Structure formats: C-alpha cells, structure tokens
Amino acid sequence: MERHGSEMNNTIEKLIKYHELTKEEYVELLESSDKAGIVNCLAKEAVKLRMKYYGKKVYTRGLIEFTNYCKNDCYYCGIRRSNRHADRYRLTKEEILECCRNGYKLGFRTFVLQGGEDPWYTDEKIVDIICSIKQEYPDCALTLSIGEKSFESYRKYKEAGADRYLLRHETACESHYKMLHPKEMSLKERKACLYNLKELGYQVGAGFMVGSPKQTLSDIADDLIFLKELNPQMVGIGPFIPHSDTIFASEEAGNLNLTLFLLSIIRIILPKVLLPATTALGTIDPKGREKGLSVGANVVMPNLSPLTNRKKYDLYDNKICTGEEAAECISCLAKRVESIGYELVNERGDALY
Ligand code: SAH
C-alpha cells in the first residue's frame, strides 16, 4: 500500500478491517478509481475474500426474459412503456418451461424469471408459473425479477416456491432517483419493496447502474451505504448503456474501470455476497465479464430466452449474446471462465447468509 499517501492508506486499511466507510471516505476512495496502486490493492483483497468463501467457483443463473411489456417508464430503459419502437412479446407458461428444460439439460440449477412490469401476468398466472417450475425442478432455485409489487403479492410468490428476488434500487439518492424516473415512481417505494422481500425470507438482490446520467460519486457513496445497511445476499451492478430510443440516447456509457473498482469495493463491504459479472459489463468491453470475475465477482447470468425473442428484450444498445442459442452461450462462457482460472459450476449457489 505504499505511495498512496498516508490518509488514503488509513482509509483502505479501515475498509479492509471494518468492511465499511463513512460517506466522505467513500467519495475520497472513489476519486482514486484511476490510481492503479489503490485499485489493485482492493482487487487483491476482494479476490482473497471471494476465494475464502467461494473458492474458484463461478455460479450460473439461467435468465429467462419472459415479457418486455412494461407499465413503467424509467427514462434509461429500452423497454419503457413510451418506447413505441419496442417490439413487444410475452412467453406462455409452456414456452417458459421449455426454457427451463433446455437450461436444466445444460446444467443450470437456478432460473431467473425477469421481465418488465406487465400486469397481463396476474398474481394467479405468476403463481401458476412458479408452481409448475418448482414441481418439475424441485432441486432448482427460482429467482424473480419482475419489479415492484405489494407485500401480499410477494407473499403469494414466496408461498408458491420462489426463493430469491432481484430488484435493483437503481440509485440510493432521492434527487438522482427523480432524474432517472417519472414522478409516479419513488425511491421510498423501491426501498420499501426490498425490505418487504427481506422480511418475507427471500434471498434479495439490490444494485445500481454505474455512470447513469447525472450520477455523482456522492450518489455512488449513498449506494454503498445503502447496500451495507440492507445487507442483501446479491448485488447486481453494471455500467449504464444508452438506448437509442430513450431521452438518454446521447448520454455517455458508464466507465469500465469504475465498474470494476466498485465490484471490488462491494466484495469487501459484503464479503459473502453473490456478485454477478453482468451482461452490460460484457457489452462495454469484450472481456468485461472476465475482468469482473477477476476483481471479485462470482456469478454469471447467461440467457435462456428463446432466440426469437432475445433481441426484443432490448434494455440498452448492442446487448451481447442475443444471437446465440443458450448452449452456445454457456460453452462460450465456460471457456471464458476457465481462461482466467475459475470454474463454472452446476450448483444452486445459495447465499451463505
Ligand atoms: N422490471 C424489472 C427488471 C428490470 S430490467 C425491475 O424493475 O426490476 C433489469 C435491470 O436492467 C434494471 O434494474 C436496470 O438496472 C438495468 N437496465 C435498464 N436499462 C439499462 C440501461 N440502459 N443500461 C444499463 N442497464 C440498464
């Protein structure tokens, strides 16, 4: 840790020892994302922690993007309701089960049902889908990622057998949240959903986009403080990538190095967290996912959606892996993971806490 200046050395030591910093300290640390010595030091510590708890294992989650209809209008998102160019689709229960069958044969033991907030799928329909998947694959974990719902709806899904829920908080700063979302959406509600999910016993995933429009380092510090407070089992972060049919079309994409730095920091803040190297990270850099795994991430989420719909779940421009069958995706990923000395495993990969 030589040559960082003694104050920064203290901050780094404090982060490693106590897994937490003050807001001012986080901001100061984030200002160092271009200092190789500091970045490498935290990456080394992050890898040490991931090795301690998870070894060289990389868990896979089979992502099934089952609808791109959405009643929300998040300004950054390509499937937002007001994007008239989006070519909308919904998968039937049978089509979803077919994705699971295909995935199971390929070794997946976690399925993630993700979609826009689509009221066509009533609670009754969602519960029926959950029950069917859990009946056919009792040995698999089922994750939902279908947005903000009532406590009662979350309760029904949990009772039907859902194990986990991904709901990124997107940004933990109230004023920044307002810049990214229409006025009918609120950070308060988003956070309340996350706490409800925890209370119901879900393994919960939160997270945010790196470099979303108008994001400051102070906002990211708020994200880190919120993550520590929520203590989720999973954290999904990836760079913001502009979508050409949104008002943010000409904004810059999030920065690779800052995203990698944040993966290391999040591994240190929450040592046992399940941390994916996301598709968005693989989109801004051809080796993005490998780089993410090399600095603390331990999960990948290949796509199991039918090839015909793949391109239509168009959250941001140039999304990778929209032209390959799931089998091709997984063998490509397995090779990528091996190339950096890690090992793709066919396990549920439940959280350690
Ligand atoms: N409707 C669900 C799923 C949203 S899509 C929900 O509300 O949780 C999953 C994630 O993709 C979002 O949480 C968001 O963080 C990310 N995303 C959306 N648009 C993006 C963009 N333009 N660039 C990068 N990530 C984006």
Image: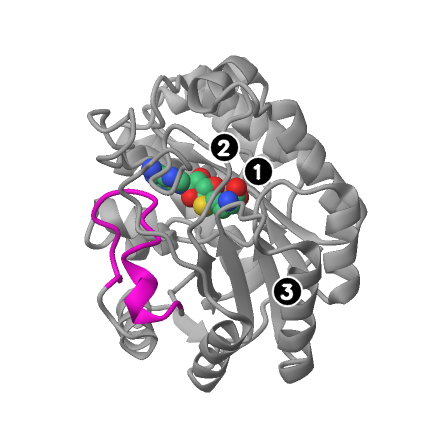
- Ligand 1 rendered quadrant: top left
Query: 169 or 64, which is in the foreground?
Result: 64
Position of residue 46 measured from the top left corner of the image (x, y, whole percent): 47, 47
Amino acid under disc 2: Glu
Return the residue at label 1.
Answer: 269
Amino acid under disc 3: Asp
Mark 3–mark 1 CB contact (< 8 Å): no
Count the numbered circles shown.
Answer: 3
- Residue sitting at x 27%, y 57%: 311
> Which contiguous range is marked in magenta?
305-322
Q: Which mark is residue 257?
A: none
Q: Is residue 311 magenta?
A: yes
Amino acid under disc 1: Ile
Return the residue at label 2.
Answer: 170
Q: Residues within 10 Å of mark 1 (few under 14, many from 20)?
A: many
Query: 171 or 129, which is in the foreground?
Result: 129
Whether residue 281 is situated above or below residue 257 in the rendered picture: below
Position of residue 272 measured from the top left corner of the image (x, y, whole percent): 60, 52
Q: Which mark is residue 350?
A: 3
Label 3 vs label 1, nearer the camera: 3
Position of residue 165 measured from the top left corner of the image (x, y, whole percent): 62, 52
* Label 2 residue near ligand 1, CB within 8 Å: yes
Q: CA distance from mark 3 to mark 1?
A: 19 Å
Q: CA distance from mark 3 to mark 2?
A: 23 Å
Magenta region, mostly helix, strand or loop? loop
Label 3 vs label 2, nearer the camera: 2
Label 1 vs label 2, nearer the camera: 2
Q: Is residue 245 left or right of residue 270?
A: left
- Residue sitting at x 28%, y 27%: 35
Q: Residues within 10 Å of mark 2 (few under 14, many from 20)?
A: many
Local SS, label 3? loop
| Residue found at the far bottom of this picture | 105
